[in-house]
Image (cartoon, rainbow, N blue to C red):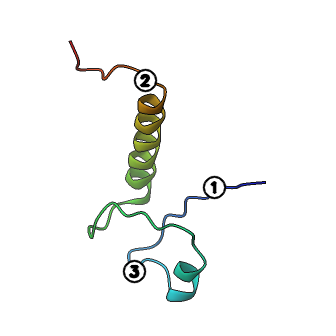
């Protein structure tokens, strides 16, 4: 079974051991974001990616 986990780290991020266990690392940049905002940004990006893959038209098209 395949599994996806999204972990939101503290201001200092994760240690090298935790980072080495990941298959893929994503970042919202070097800025430090509040956890609730980071969660909202991740949810929005996942929704956008799902919409694109489903060929849903961009909301500002047309």
For marks 1 and 3, give the one nearer the viewer.
Answer: 1
For marks 3 and 2, give the one nearer the viewer.
Answer: 2
Residue at 51% over, 66% down: 24
Callouts 1 and 2 close, C-beta under 8 Å: no
Residue 38: image quadrant is bottom left
Residue 12's tag is 3
Q: Earlier in the sequence, mark 3 or mark 2?
A: 3
Residue 23 image position (x, y, % from top left): 57, 69
Q: Which residue is mark 2?
A: 55
Q: Nearer the viewer, residue 21 or 28?
A: 21
User: How far is mark 1 from mark 2, CA to CA?
Assistant: 23 Å
Classify 25 as above or below 60: below
User: How far is mark 1 from mark 3, CA to CA?
Assistant: 22 Å
Q: Secondary structure at mark 1?
A: loop
Q: Earlier in the sequence, mark 1 or mark 2?
A: 1
Q: Nearer the viewer, residue 16 or 37?
A: 16
Q: Residues within 10 Å of mark 1 (few under 14, many from 20)?
A: few
Relative horizontal placement of residue 46, taking residue 33 as reference (left or right)? right
Residue at 54% over, 64% down: 7
Q: Nearer the viewer, residue 42 or 61?
A: 61
For marks 1 and 2, give the one nearer the viewer.
Answer: 2
Classify 48 as above or below 31: above
Q: Which residue is mark 1?
A: 4
Residue at 40% over, 35% down: 48
Classify 56 as above or below 20: above
Q: Residues within 10 Å of mark 3 (few under 14, many from 20)?
A: few
Residue at 57% over, 87% down: 17
Residue 6 image position (x, y, % from top left): 55, 58
């Amino acid at each position: 079974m395949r599994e996806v986990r999204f972990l939101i780290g503290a201001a200092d991020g994760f240690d090298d051991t935790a980072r080495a266990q990941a298959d893929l690392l994503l970042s919202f940049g070097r800025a430090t974001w509040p956890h609730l905002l980071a969660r909202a940004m991740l949810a929005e990006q996942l929704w956008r990616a799902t919409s694109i893959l489903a060929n849903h038209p961009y909301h500002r098209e047309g």
